[in-house]
Amino acid sequence: MRTLGATLERVAPGEVDLALAFREDLTQQHGFVHAGVIAAVVDSACGYAALSLMEPGAAVLSVEFKVQLLAPARGARFLALGRVVRAGRTLTVVAGEVRDDGDEVVALLNGTMMAVRGRPELAD
Amino acid sequence: MRTLGATLERVAPGEVDLALAFREDLTQQHGFVHAGVIAAVVDSACGYAALSLMEPGAAVLSVEFKVQLLAPARGARFLALGRVVRAGRTLTVVAGEVRDDGDEVVALLNGTMMAVRGRPELAD
Amino acid sequence: MRTLGATLERVAPGEVDLALAFREDLTQQHGFVHAGVIAAVVDSACGYAALSLMEPGAAVLSVEFKVQLLAPARGARFLALGRVVRAGRTLTVVAGEVRDDGDEVVALLNGTMMAVRGRPELAD
Amino acid sequence: MRTLGATLERVAPGEVDLALAFREDLTQQHGFVHAGVIAAVVDSACGYAALSLMEPGAAVLSVEFKVQLLAPARGARFLALGRVVRAGRTLTVVAGEVRDDGDEVVALLNGTMMAVRGRPELAD
């Protein structure tokens, strides 16, 4: 997230918001922020949201996620909201969205995160 | 793609391969390449593959994609293969995968791309 | 939907609810309602929701959908809620959920519907 | 699957094919087989494929799947092919497709199955 310049805006149990400032080098060929950058930020927000409900020492890995692009990601600043929909012992279902600075939803994420335990080299 | 350092390896009608070299700043907290970076590269490979079958002047936008992470993205170099499964006039169905330098598949993408026409500011 | 015995509970612009009564022959091997039946009902609810915002003569086809199963579909009656998230001229983004009779969400759907026009044999 | 009239055509480790005969009552409003029925059959084929690689006593549940509809499901008979892409101890990644009697692919599935153990009431 450092490479993308994303910053942590808010953390609550099961909820994490990340902010991303527009940068020329994150755009695709049409001047919008690249779909993959949008996916990376909202996947991270959702991963942290899942982790916020796990016990210390657990790590979180993305199993899969789907991203739907609703509108071109234009604007100076984006907010990625990650939310836990259902936390299980092994799998956590997450939902996220990315809003532009006019508060329009530009992307949705729906995914599955997995808790990894007993592997200290992965501890978050 | 320039920010990620991805390079074009191969282009054929409906098929585009991109290579990505491991870089410290693309990793997540466990030292693997971040799922979002993986998604960005394979989404790009699939977008270019879709574009390769469209007429000049058309542009391509991602409607949605799903990424499944099969194994941690460890290694020095990754290859993202983008393939057109079915090309329609408006929508193109794409499938992609990311292979590590041991040729193991670390991620799958299945998505939908949309052709945009008559908007010269978007022409690819 | 007649084969499944689903009934229309509520229609509003962009919102359609379908009810499904438990039937022995819709269960999978463990006695829960089969994931595919759940998918069929919530896909239908979302398709009708998309159609409710289109002009007369248009038809709607599912382009793709993702279903996440949150809990086993146990119970005597299920409600499938289909909602339009964003209606475009060609593509409509939809979200749906299935609730059991204790109002627990047992499944989520996120999908893309397409309007088909000028093909009277398809008109809904 | 009995309600849909699907029959088992082929079983090999990690591979299961199911056949579905066209029936009037499985169609949607345009006379094609309903997307949800298509999803149900290919989800079942993939679930059985996952189960074919698990030890006796294990059960399989669908965590999530995405279905992409490539062409209207017209024809007298359909074949749903379920394949294991990667089998893990807890999660199994599956891919499936549905072919019509002209061998055209009408739908793709990509999903995640979960093994459930130590719950004899679920044993498959």
Image: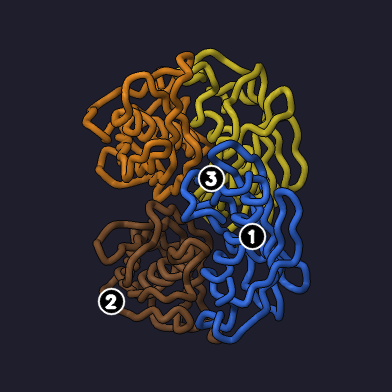
Chain colours: A brown, B blue, C orange, D yellow
Judging from the image, mark 3 belongs to the subunit labelled B
Q: Do pointers 2 and 1 mark residues of a single chain?
A: no
Q: Can residue C19 be seen in this view?
A: no
- Foreground mark, 2 or 1, reads 1
Residue occupied by mark 2 = A11
Please, what secondary structure does the residue beneath circle 3 have?
strand
Q: Do pointers 3 and 1 mark residues of a single chain?
A: yes
Using the numbered discs, state the Cα–Cα distance from disc 2 to disc 1 in whole angstroms.
34 Å
Quarter containing the N terminus of chain C: top left
Of label 3 and label 1, which has the lower sequence position? 1
Task: List x then y, in percent, for residue A66.
Answer: 48, 55
Q: Are marks 2 and 1 in contact (CB under 8 Å)?
A: no
Judging from the image, mark 2 belongs to the subunit labelled A
Please, what secondary structure does the residue beneath circle 2 have?
strand
Residue occupied by mark 3 = B115
Image height of D28 relative to A64, above or below: above
Residue occupied by mark 1 = B45
- Foreground mark, 3 or 1, reads 3
Residue type marked 2: Val
Task: List x then y, in percent, for residue C13.
Answer: 23, 32
Task: List x then y, in percent, for residue B63.
Answer: 48, 49
Q: Nearer the viewer, residue C118 or C69?
A: C118
Q: Residue at x 66, y 25 (%)?
A: D78
**Residue C89: quadrant of the picture:** top left
Q: Which of C73 and D117 is in front in this view?
A: C73
Residue type marked 1: Ala
Image height of A98 relative to C73, above or below: below
